[in-house]
Image (cartoon, helix red, strand yellow):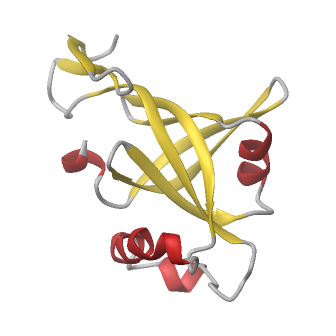
Amino acid sequence: MTELFGKDCEMALATAKGNVPTVRYVDTYYQDRSFYIVTDENSQKAKDILTNPHVALAIRACRFTGIAINIGHPLDASNQKIRETLIKAFESWYFAHNDETNSQMCFIKIEVNNGIFGKEGSNNAYKVDFKNKIAEIVPAYA
C-alpha cells in the first residue's frame, strides 16, 4: 500500500448526503492504514462526512471503503507529525492552495476498512479486509 499510495495520488472520493452520492477528485496520501486529504470544513465533502462518515475512494482498478474523520486544523498540536508528512507529499501545491491562517482548513483521515488493489500490468489483485487483517488474491477485475 505504501509503495502504491504513499505519495500524492489523485483519487475519486465518494461521499453521500442522505441517499445522494457525490464523487469528486481529491489528492490523497496513504500512511498506516489511512488516507489523508486536505480541505476546508465548509467544503461539501467535509459537510457530507460530518453527517455520514462512510466513504469510498477509487483510482483506476483500485477501490477502498472506510470511515472518514475530520482530525482538525493543520496547526493543531496533535497534527504536527502528519502536517509535516503532508507538506512533503503535497510539496508542489500545498502552500499555493492552502491558507493555514484560515481557521476552517482541516485534515480528513480516512481509516480504510476494505479494499481491492493491485499493480498495473498484473492479472491479480489483493482483496483486503484491513480491520481483520485478511488478504486474498483475486482476479484483477473482481
> Which corner quadrant of the image does residue 115 belong to?
top left
Circle count: 0
> Which corner quadrant of the image does residue 136 belong to?
top left
Check the image and name the residue furthest to the front: 77
Q: Is residue 113 above or below residue 2?
A: above
Q: Position of residue 42 (x, y in %)?
A: 80, 63
Horizontal arrangement in the rendering, residue 80 relative to residue 48 (left or right): left
Q: Is residue 57 above or below residue 127?
A: below
Q: Is residue 77 above or below residue 44?
A: below
Q: Position of residue 68 (x, y in %)?
A: 59, 43
- Seen from the viewer's position, the closer of residues 10 and 115 is 115
Residue at image coords 76%, 46%: 50
Q: Position of residue 81 (x, y in %)?
A: 38, 72
Residue at image coords 52%, 78%: 77
- The quadrant of the picture occupied by the C terminus is top left
Residue at image coords 34%, 20%: 132
- Seen from the viewer's position, the closer of residues 118 and 40 is 40
Q: Position of residue 85 (x, y in %)?
A: 35, 71
Residue at image coords 40%, 79%: 92
Horizontal arrangement in the rendering, residue 46 relative to residue 112 (left or right): right
Check the image and name the residue furthest to the left: 122
- The quadrant of the picture occupied by the N terminus is top left
Check the image and name the residue furthest to the bottom: 101
